């Protein structure tokens, strides 16, 4: 089969690999659509993201859908021809976080297309992948593969919303209007948020946010004066989702959130220590919570997409065949033109 492989910073190659074989409980999936995530872009641009560094060639991709090609002898949930979204994580089910219902915090989790563990678990930007059947979530035969491939990033958004708690009637700020920021917005809207404000440094992404239903968008490229005013007008935002992963944005969040408010850190900050205005966390009695990937919401995300409860189609700005994967990565990096770019296989 053909696979996209990152060998290091700036080094993406199309290579031939052996077709994978499956065990009795495994499913072989013909990948049909794969979304390029910010983390994939980081792997290609810098050879790593945060503390996860590429140490061997890595097939990226963890947001993908496909068609079941073959099933192992003991697989009962899916059959060849079924359309599936693939949960990219395999948690152990035994460790303390797993037993407490937080499989995303599993100490032994393998996550496809991630360099968090060595050897790396290879990802989905190739023609065939294998997964255990519990990773496969069947969707309607009519659901477009590109929409189905939003299941993973939508799961991230739903999980972030869960981490914030009850959003009903809350004034919500989302810093960073990329694909995850926009999906968090859609999730928070569904969760009953009273108002949704998005910030970014690009007018183009904010324009999409407005189209997707943002109540207020603020360009913070020239400073946070407009955001400060918006925050003051409502006595501070009840909940802030920091999605940009920019250290300055976390401090902005600490300023913009209401006293006693909640900040959910969704974006990947750079590895190592960051200067944070910790005194304000104390003085405003803030709750700062991390949201890492997602826990048990993947099935909910799949259902939202399959039943049309959350419409993500406005976020898809490009679909590029695998032979032009490098172009797809370049498009995804160009935030002035693109939101979510997918590779078709
Ligand atoms: Zn992702
Ligand atoms: Zn575990």
Image: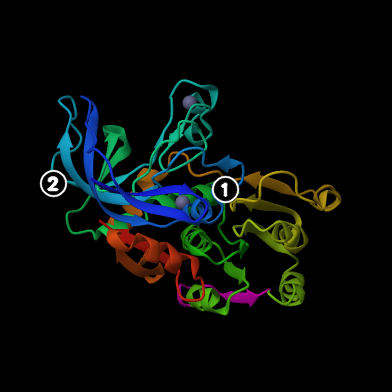
Residue in view at x 51 percent, y 73 percent: 209
CB of mark 2 within 8 Å of CB of mark 1? no
**Residue farthest to the top?**
94
Q: Nearer the viewer, residue 315 or 59?
A: 59
Locate residue 311, reporting x and y percent.
Answer: 36, 65
Circle 2 residues within 10 Å: few <14, some 14–19, many ≥20: some
**Quarter where residue 198 is shown:** bottom right
Locate residue 327, reporting x and y percent.
Answer: 38, 66
Does 20 appear above or below 259?
A: above
- Position of the C terminus by quadrant: bottom left
Badge number at residue 62: none
- For disc 1, the marked residue is 49
Q: Which residues are magenta?
A: 211-220
| Callout count | 2
Residue 240 visible from this viewpoint: yes
Residue in view at x 57 percent, y 56 percent: 167
- For disc 2, the marked residue is 81
Q: Secondary structure at mark 1?
A: strand
Does 206 appear above or below 328?
A: below
- Going by the image, does 309 lie left or right of 174? left
Does 94 appear above or below 62?
A: above
């Amino acid at each position: 089969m053909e696979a996209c492989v990152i060998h290091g910073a700036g080094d993406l190659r199309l290579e031939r690999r052996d077709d994978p074989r499956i065990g009795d409980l495994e499913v072989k999936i013909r990948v049909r659509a794969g979304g390029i995530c910010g983390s994939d872009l980081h792997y290609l641009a810098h050879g790593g993201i945060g503390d996860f560094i590429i140490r061997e060639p890595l097939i990226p991709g963890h947001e993908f859908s496909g068609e079941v090609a073959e099933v192992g002898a003991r697989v009962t949930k899916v059959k060849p021809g079924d359309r599936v979204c693939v949960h990219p994580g395999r948690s152990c089910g035994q460790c303390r976080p797993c037993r407490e219902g937080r499989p995303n915090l599993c100490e032994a989790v393998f996550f496809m297309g991630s360099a968090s563990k060595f050897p790396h678990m290879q990802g989905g930007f190739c023609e065939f992948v294998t997964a255990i059947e519990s990773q496969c979530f069947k969707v309607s035969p009519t659901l477009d593969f590109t929409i189905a491939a939003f299941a993973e990033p939508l799961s991230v958004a739903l999980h972030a919303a869960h981490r914030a708690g009850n959003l009903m009637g809350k004034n919500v700020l989302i810093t960073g209007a990329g694909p995850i920021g926009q999906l968090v917005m859609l999730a928070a809207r569904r969760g009953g948020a009273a108002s949704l404000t998005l910030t970014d440094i690009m007018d183009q992404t904010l324009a999409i946010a407005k189209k997707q239903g943002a109540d207020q968008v603020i360009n913070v490229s020239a400073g946070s004066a407009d955001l400060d005013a918006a925050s003051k007008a409502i006595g501070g935002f009840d909940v802030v989702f920091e999605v940009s992963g920019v250290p300055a944005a976390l401090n902005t969040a600490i300023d913009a959130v209401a006293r006693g408010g909640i900040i959910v850190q969704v974006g990947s900050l750079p590895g190592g220590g960051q200067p944070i205005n910790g005194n304000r966390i104390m003085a405003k009695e803030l709750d700062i919570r991390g949201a890492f990937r997602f826990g048990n919401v993947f099935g909910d995300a799949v259902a939202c997409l399959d039943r049309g409860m959350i419409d993500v189609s406005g976020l898809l700005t490009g679909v590029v065949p695998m032979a032009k994967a490098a172009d797809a990565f370049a498009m995804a990096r160009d935030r002035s033109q693109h939101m979510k770019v997918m590779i078709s296989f």
